[in-house]
């Protein structure tokens, strides 16, 4: 090892930035991986629910048209997408005879260019026979396609003993990710080989590769999936591009031409994926001195028109963390999934976290008020103590490390909490509306692939292959000139994986990060991967880095053996590489020839669910304390964030610069959910937020400054002690901001997003609607 | 998101542009394209001919008491022109975004007549003029006689906006522009422009125009009358706001109720009146 300070832990600027800042990034739409590609336009439903009859004759006769893929073709060539539960409403790559949301694919027109394809798409005649649309998931709860109840401890008895029982319903609306780059797919069917090669800006999880292959009726090796070097962001949503991998794959197969499709913004907003909407009645029992002794959730989850894989995962991703950061011995939850005539749900940064913590953290704030306690004090009385770590929650999570009270102290200090209180009191004395919000949340990372099987009963699970864990693969190769190449299966979307992996490999092999080439382009035919590969649940720093390090360590051992065999421990890497490649007969006894290693790594704590439905739903658990102060302008209802402090314990920070970037991004996403974003459908199921004019994604000037603090409790269950950090503030900020606004205006019934007109309507002079 | 096929002519003069427009009743002029191109791509409009005005010699600003702004002068150019009326210099940074102002034109915004656009409200507030030219020759149109409703003006077929005329700020004049949008750079929910003079301690020539809550720049005559000849105080500005709130009747949207939009307009009028008054002092 180099005698200098390790590269891991340094705030190294990203290697990825140079090409991006020069405008030289290579996104899928910049590539032409296949010659003579034809262009697809998707015909989409204009109604929320209707029987359809499709006539494509005019489109087929239009100039430049190669052909049209219809629902009948899709039905003949493919199978429904497998999902976590059987909802009774199978989903194919297009609607089959019935459309179930505005924007649902009906047909694919393939033409020589996109202009001609769109011209012909207008000529596809769709005869709609309208059906009633379901738009209110709560009103439709009786039609739930999934209904499971869980109990840990004795919730009913504890509620009976509680001095204060709160019961309130909270709603988290559907919001989404809004990457700069929308979906893109190129599909090339090889009829002779019976093989589909696709390029897509897919982000994983690669469970969905299996879902796509199953829908296509292909063996896994017959669906080769590649990703481009750069991605214009995803934040979850590009997991659902798998549905279009299938759709364009079928178009290519049916029409015998390579097909390219780049989604436009209107398509993206209407029919890519949005987070689930969740309405949760939270019942919480406290003792008079502020101990939360029981909590019960009754959750109604709106997943849109279909249960699309990996749903109903949003409900179960946080299952081990139902009690958040608190020692609550009794917890129960009822989970219902309802289908509505809206776009299907999918991954969205924070996945399940915003939905859970909005109810829990709003409840804590309301309880503090009722109990006459400062919210920071109420949190402190309930936080899991440091000496209880590692801590097993009632629902099965194993919190791996952390000193939550120390984080709270650090946040209070960073925020100058007493000073902030004084500032708010002074504003109030001047007749203004000001308030403070706090959120204390656990940020789980590295999902257990088995958590989704909680959607089944223990008896049902016993009949199938157990599912668990979260493994990743990587390879490190050294060429004859000593050049080092790393291959990743993490499909990064801007996080900086290449930089961090170069730091890890540099430390292991004793070189500089600049000497390591990290290839983040995924290729299912050549990169070591697992069903868990991809970027989601903030698994990179904990798992993927472990695989990269393990591969590098294998090589390091071999390099050391060659050096020892040569009797020169200072032999250069280039020289070692030359010897390994050019003189394999001179290698040390017992060593394989070659200088390349593949390794896999998985955290050791992710068992399948047990018979009592307990699940270690994630491997690593960071902790976050957010404190914010807001002022609400009486005249306009505008919420101004006066100060926002976030303190993270994400274990060991592999690259503090990138970690802060992730925190800022997660915060922007969470603030968007708090103050700006939601999808709105009208009573007929028309999407009212169909463009960025009405879907209010905030831009840079709209995002307030964020002050970040870090503590570090290295994780004992990840390779380098790191935990995920990119999703936490998306989970915490909606609750924290809502707590502050509620404090400012003296209302418990604040609802997301807290746009000025909606806040104004809660004020005394509001007109109530 | 690709447009329907169309023909394209790059006019080298106003005469050429007018002639080209006259050849095709479904022709549309294009200048900066910041509203038109998205509408084309979304196929909301389907002109058969685009007549490009960017080379038609309409890109200059002249000043002789009145600022004559050629139709294809970029919004960003006017924003940074120190001769522009203070109201314009306050409102222009609120027109779209930095990058759209680099392409978007002053004349295009006027001719497009979006009820939520800042420039029509400003032109009406300062008492400016639209210069149009068509097959029937050149004419000057007052804003109140030009803007009809959303995206509709009294321009005749084949007629173009070639310039706008902006009076210079007068002595003892103060102005203010206020708008409220849900995001920086968004279409405003409501906007207000106020221009007045402060002579001998009282307000004169008070002009209040609102937009976004109306389908075209709309004067609030009741509030103007309440301020005329009066020494403006906070209470009087508030009263002007109340009058304005009662005078508008905006439809609601998924974002805001009519009640909110009325109250917001009142607030913006109150603020703009006070600021204009202070600046006039």
Image (tube, rainbow, N blue to C red):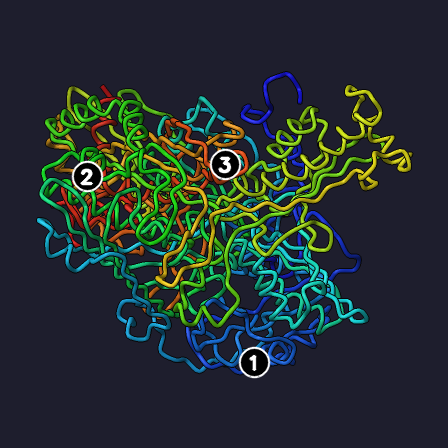
User: Helix, strand, or loop for circle 2?
Assistant: loop
* Quadrant in which residue A438 is drawn: top left
Residue B188: horizontal and vertical position, in percent?
35, 43
The answer to whether A190 is drawn above or below residue A665 in the figure is: below
Q: Tag 1, which chain?
A: A
User: Helix, strand, or loop for circle 3?
Assistant: helix
Q: Image check: A193 left or right of B270?
A: right
**Foreground label between 1 and 3:** 1
Q: Earlier in the sequence, mark 2 or mark 1?
A: 1
User: Helix, strand, or loop for circle 1?
Assistant: strand
Q: Quadrant of the C terminus of chain A?
A: bottom left
Q: Image check: A341 left or right of A68?
A: left
Determine the residue positioned at 39% across, 31% down.
B88
Q: Residues within 10 Å of mark 2 (few under 14, many from 20)?
A: some
Q: Residues within 10 Å of mark 3 (few under 14, many from 20)?
A: many
Q: Nearer the viewer, residue A91 or A412?
A: A412
**Foreground label between 2 and 1:** 1
Residue A131: horizontal and vertical position, in percent?
39, 80
Q: Confirm whether residue A33 shows in the render.
A: yes
Q: Nearer the viewer, residue A33 or A554?
A: A554
Q: Which mark is residue A54?
A: 1
How much space separates mark 1 and mark 3, taking CA atoms?
A: 44 Å
The answer to whether B177 is drawn above or below residue B242 in the figure is: above
Q: Image check: A470 left or right of A378?
A: right
According to the image, label 3 marks what residue? B101
How much space separates mark 2 and mark 1, taking CA atoms?
A: 52 Å
Q: Which mark is residue A297?
A: none
According to the image, label 2 marks what residue? A635
């Amino acid at each position: 090892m180099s005698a200098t300070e390790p590269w891991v832990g340094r705030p190294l600027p990203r290697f990825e930035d140079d090409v991006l800042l020069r405008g030289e990034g290579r996104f899928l739409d910049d590539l032409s991986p296949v010659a003579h590609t034809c262009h697809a336009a998707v015909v989409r439903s204009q109604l929320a629910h209707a029987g359809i009859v499709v006539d494509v004759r005019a489109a087929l006769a239009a100039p430049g048209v190669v052909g049209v893929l219809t629902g009948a073709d899709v039905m003949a060539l493919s199978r429904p997408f497998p999902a976590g539960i059987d909802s009774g409403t199978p989903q194919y790559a297009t609607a089959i005879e019935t459309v179930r949301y505005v924007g649902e694919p009906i047909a694919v027109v393939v033409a020589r260019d996109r202009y001609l394809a769109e011209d012909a798409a207008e000529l596809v005649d769709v005869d709609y026979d309208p059906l009633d649309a379901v738009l209110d998931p709560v009103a439709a709860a009786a039609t739930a396609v999934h209904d499971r109840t869980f109990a840990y401890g004795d919730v009913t008895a504890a509620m009976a003993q509680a001095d204060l029982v709160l019961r309130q319903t909270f709603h988290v609306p559907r919001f989404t990710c809004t990457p700069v780059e929308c979906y893109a797919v190129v599909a090339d069917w090889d009829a002779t080989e019976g093989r589909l090669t696709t390029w897509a800006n897919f982000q994983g999880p690669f469970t969905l590769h299996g879902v796509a292959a199953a829908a296509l009726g292909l063996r896994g090796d017959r669906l080769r999936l590649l990703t481009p070097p750069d991605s214009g962001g995803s934040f979850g949503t590009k997991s659902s591009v798998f549905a279009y991998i299938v759709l364009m794959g079928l178009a290519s197969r049916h029409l015998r031409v390579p097909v390219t499709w780049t989604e436009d913004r209107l398509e993206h907003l209407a029919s890519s994926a949005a987070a689930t909407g969740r309405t949760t009645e939270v019942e919480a029992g406290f003792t008079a001195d502020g101990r939360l002794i029981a909590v019960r959730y009754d959750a109604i989850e709106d997943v849109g028109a279909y249960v699309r894989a990996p749903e109903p995962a949003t409900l179960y991703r946080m299952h081990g963390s139902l009690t958040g950061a608190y020692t609550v011995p009794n917890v129960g939850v009822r989970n219902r999934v309802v289908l509505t005539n809206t776009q299907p749900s999918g991954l969205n940064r924070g996945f399940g976290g915003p939905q859970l913590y909005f109810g829990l953290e709003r409840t804590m704030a309301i309880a503090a008020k009722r109990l006459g306690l400062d919210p920071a004090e109420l949190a402190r009385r309930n936080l899991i103590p440091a000496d209880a770590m590692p801590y097993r929650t009632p629902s099965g999570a194993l919190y791996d490390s952390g000193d939550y009270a120390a984080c709270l102290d650090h946040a209070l200090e960073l925020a100058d909490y007493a000073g902030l209180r004084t500032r708010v009191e002074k504003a109030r004395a001047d007749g203004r509306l000001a308030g403070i919000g706090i959120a204390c949340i656990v940020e789980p990372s590295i999902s257990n692939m088995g958590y989704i099987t909680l959607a089944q009963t223990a008896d049902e699970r016993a009949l199938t292959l157990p599912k668990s864990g979260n493994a990743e693969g990587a390879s490190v190769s050294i060429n004859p000139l000593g050049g080092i190449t790393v291959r990743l299966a993490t499909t990064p979307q801007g996080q900086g994986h290449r930089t961090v992996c170069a730091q890890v490999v540099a430390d292991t092999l004793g070189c500089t990060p600049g000497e390591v080439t990290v290839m983040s382009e995924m290729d299912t035919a050549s990169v070591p991967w697992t069903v868990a590969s991809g970027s989601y649940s903030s698994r990179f720093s904990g798992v993927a880095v472990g695989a990269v390090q393990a591969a590098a360590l294998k090589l390091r051992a071999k390099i050391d053996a060659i050096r020892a065999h040569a009797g020169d421990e200072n032999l250069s890497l280039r020289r070692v590489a030359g010897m390994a490649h050019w003189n394999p007969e001179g290698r040390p006894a017992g060593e394989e020839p070659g200088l390349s290693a593949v390794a896999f790594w998985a955290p050791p704590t992710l068992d399948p669910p047990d018979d009592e439905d307990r699940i270690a739903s994630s491997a690593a658990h960071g902790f976050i304390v957010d404190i914010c102060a807001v002022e609400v302008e009486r005249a306009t209802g505008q919420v101004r964030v006066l100060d926002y402090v976030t303190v993270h314990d994400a274990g060991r920070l592999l690259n503090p610069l990138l970690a802060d970037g992730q925190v800022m991004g997660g915060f922007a996403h969470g603030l968007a959910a708090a103050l700006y974003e939601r999808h709105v459908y009208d009573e007929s199921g028309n999407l009212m937020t169909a463009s960025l004019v009405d879907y209010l994604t905030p831009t840079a000037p709209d995002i307030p400054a964020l002050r970040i603090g870090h503590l570090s409790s290295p994780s004992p269950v990840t390779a380098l002690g790191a935990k995920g950090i990119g999703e936490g503030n998306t989970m915490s900020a909606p609750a924290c901001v809502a707590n502050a606004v509620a404090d400012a205006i003296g209302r418990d019934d604040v609802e997301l997003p807290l746009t000025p007109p909606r806040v104004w309507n809660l004020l005394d002079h509001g007109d109530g609607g | 998101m690709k447009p329907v096929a169309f023909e394209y002519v790059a006019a080298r003069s106003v005469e050429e542009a007018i002639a080209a427009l006259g050849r095709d009743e479904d022709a549309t002029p294009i200048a900066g394209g910041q509203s038109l191109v998205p509408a084309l791509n979304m196929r909301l409009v389907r002109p058969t001919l685009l007549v490009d005005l960017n080379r038609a010699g309409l890109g200059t600003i002249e000043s002789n008491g009145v600022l004559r702004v050629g139709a294809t002068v970029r919004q960003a150019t006017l924003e940074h022109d120190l001769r522009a009326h203070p109201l314009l210099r306050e409102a222009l940074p609120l027109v779209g975004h930095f990058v759209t102002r680099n392409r978007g034109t002053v004349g295009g915004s006027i001719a497009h007549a979006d009820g939520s656009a800042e420039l029509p409200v400003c032109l009406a507030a300062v008492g400016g003029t639209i210069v149009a030219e068509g097959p029937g020759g050149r004419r000057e149109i007052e804003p109140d006689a030009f803007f009809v409703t959303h995206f509709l003006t009294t321009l005749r077929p084949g007629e173009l906006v070639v310039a706008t005329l902006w009076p210079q700020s007068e002595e003892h004049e103060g102005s203010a522009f206020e708008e409220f949008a849900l995001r920086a750079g968004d279409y405003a929910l409501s906007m207000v422009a106020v221009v007045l003079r402060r002579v001998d301690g009282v307000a004169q020539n008070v002009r209040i125009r609102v937009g976004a809550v109306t389908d075209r720049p709309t004067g609030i005559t009741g509030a103007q009358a309440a301020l005329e000849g009066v020494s403006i105080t906070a209470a009087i500005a508030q009263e002007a706001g109340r009058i304005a709130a009662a005078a508008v009747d905006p439809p609601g949207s998924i974002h805001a109720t009519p009640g909110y939009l009325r109250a917001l307009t009142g607030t913006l009028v109150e603020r703009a009146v006070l600021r204009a008054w202070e600046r006039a002092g």
